[in-house]
Image (tube, grey):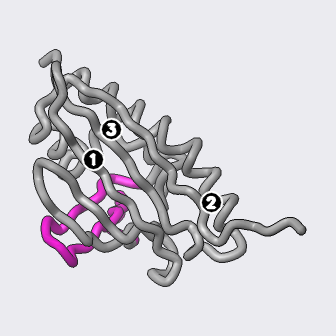
Amino acid sequence: MNVRPTTLPPVQHRAQVRLAPAAAFELFTTQIARWWPFRGHSCFGDNAADVVFEPRVGGAVTEVARDGERMAWGTLTEWSPPDAFAMRWYPGLDAAEATMLRVSFVAVAGGTEVSVHHAGWEARGAAAAAKRDQYEGGWPATLAAFGQQAEVEAAA
């Protein structure tokens, strides 16, 4: 008998950057438009202009298009600068399909380790496994874009 697991494993990725945790946290959140790969990783694609974090538990995370249109990405469940933030993640979807995303920033020799922990895939229903696989491939590219901008910041 082939039994499918009821819980898909989280997507987990890490990157090290040459910034202090506070600077890495700020770049990842309030300066996200400087590095986020909007093409392919946003609701508005090439028309995306920014992502705004309301810096508090319960605050909205919202993508903003160049024309001012807004689309919810999720709701913050933790806001602990410079250590971490967590959110219910549902970019462009109904909140009932939210997964759980946590990004942490830990000081290490020479900078910060940024860790992504993305779980709760079952909320995506029949598409859960496919969505998890999509993010398994997407987070490394996103962290690479973050790392490139962090390197520019560290060199400045």
Q: How much space separates mark 1 and mark 2, taking CA atoms?
A: 23 Å
Name the foreground residue: 54 vs 118.
Answer: 118
For label 3, the crowd category at 10 Å Cα-Cα, with few meaning under 14, some 14 to 19 and many 20 or more, is some
Single out the residue that lies furthest toward the front. 1
Q: What is the C-alpha distance between the residues marked 3 and 2?
A: 23 Å
Which disc is residue 32 wearing? 1
Going by the numbered disc 2, the residue's amino acid type is Lys
Q: Which residues are magenta?
A: 48-71
Residue 101 percent coordinates (x, y): 38, 60
Q: Examine the image and state in which quarter residue 25 appears.
A: top left
Residue at the image point whose x is 26% and y is 48% from the top? 104
Tell me if label 3 and label 1 are in contact, CB under 8 Å.
yes
Image depth: mark 1 or mark 2 in front:
2
Q: Position of residue 75 (x, y in %)?
A: 30, 73
Dot 1 crowding, Cα within 10 Å, few <14, some 14–19, many 20+:
some
Identify residue type, mark 1: Ile
Identify the image quadrant of the C terminus: top left
Q: Is residue 70 visible?
A: no
Residue depicted at 25% across the width and 45% down the height: 28
Q: Please say if the residues under marks 3 and 2 sit with CB atoms less than 8 Å apart.
A: no
| Circle 2: element type | helix
Q: What is the C-alpha distance between the residues marked 3 and 1? A: 6 Å
Residue 24 in view: yes
Q: Nearer the viewer, mark 3 or mark 2?
A: 2
Q: Which mark, by number, is residue 53?
A: none
